[in-house]
Amino acid sequence: MDDPEPPATDEGLVPHIRTSVLLASLLATAAGLLLYALDIPGDDIYLFVAGLSGGASVAEAAEALERRDAAREHNEVLRRNQELQDRVSALNKQIRTMREPALRAAAAIGSAFVMRNTNPDSEDAVFLGVSDELRAAHDVNDTYGICRAMKTRWGTHASESFMLGRQLTGGLGDPTLLAQEETRSLIRDRLGLRTDDTALVAAVDLALQAQVEPGALMRYAGQVLRYITMDSTSVKAKQLRARLVRGHEGLEEDGPTTGDDSDSDFRRQLAILVAAGVHENDPDVRLFLGVLSQDTEMVAEAMASGANPNVPDIEILRRHRSVLDAAE
């Protein structure tokens, strides 16, 4: 008769269980590393490994799922926020592009308004819809109705651009005012509404603060005035901006920038016009002459006579081409 088999004991089962668990853990670890190499999200790796090894409780699995869902929700929120920021940025750019012509026109009207030669039926005035307000204005300080109309129809940026053009043109008559802190602060704030070019705004403020010589202040302010009435995307505007950012030195290096002639050539042709007596009847010529000779009294007189600081030098040459041709 065969001897009965001895009963199984816990001591005999433990080595077998340990071996099975060890093999399962090794397989789970290898699978986890493979999934990691395939760039599978971390919580998914954990769930897979936990399922193979049998070491994850229901609670642990639920927590892993919650972490995964929370991460996905967080990433979705970030994505939506970025989309909204991109849309807002694009909308602001579109608004700026649509508003740019209005800001240029407002600055030009503000400049002409100081010299009392604003035409209520001009293209800029009709475009902005302020013809009636310009007719109703009694003097250069009667700006309330004009600013209110511009603000209502075009926003604060337009009304402040009008005041910026007015302020810079007024400063040409007394350039020492441009260096005063109160005036500089207003110019800085209004220029900041006219353009989002923070580097230019800072450069203009620094140039007005650093320079106290009236002639240099007058020339620099005149070029800032010219810039804010130009299409900022044009090549000439970008060239002028580069000079303005360099301060007074930039303007002195390049001289007049509106025509193709050099500074010395323009001065020569201006001297021909003065010798012919053109300046006696053309305040724009006297204005250029006063700026180039740094004669503030002549500038003030020319502006009081209706000179337009926005007229480029090449327009002066075209206007009196017959006189120039006769002299040559």
Image: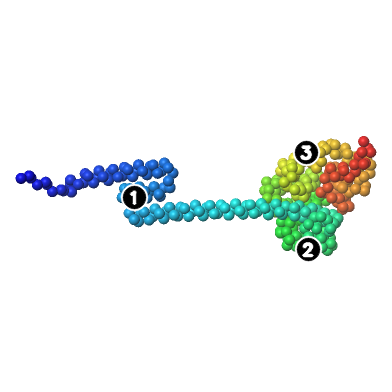
Q: Label 3 amino acid?
A: Asp
Q: Are marks 2 and 1 in contact (CB under 8 Å)?
A: no
Name the disc covering residue 51, or none: 1
Packing grade of label 2 (10 A; few <14, some 14-19, many >=20) is some
The label nearer to you, 1 versus 3, is 1
Secondary element type, mark 2: helix
Q: Is residue 15 above or below residue 155?
A: above
Q: Label 2 amino acid?
A: Gly
- Residue farthest along the front direction in this orientation: 1
The disc, 2 or 1, on the residue closer to the chain's N-terminal end is 1
Q: CA distance from mark 1 to mark 3?
A: 76 Å
**Coloration of the structure image:** rainbow
At which x and y percent is residue 36? 41, 43
At which x and y percent is residue 16? 22, 44
**Which residue is pictured at 89% across the width and 49% down the height?**
283
At which x and y percent is residue 73? 48, 55
Q: Is residue 160 above or below residue 291?
A: below
Residue 70 seen from this side: yes
Instruction: Locate residue 131 relative to residue 10 in the image: left or right.
Output: right
Packing grade of label 1 (10 A; few <14, some 14-19, many >=20) is some
Q: Label 1 amino acid?
A: Gly
Name the disc covering residue 145, or none: 2
- Find disc 3 in the rendering and name its residue: 254
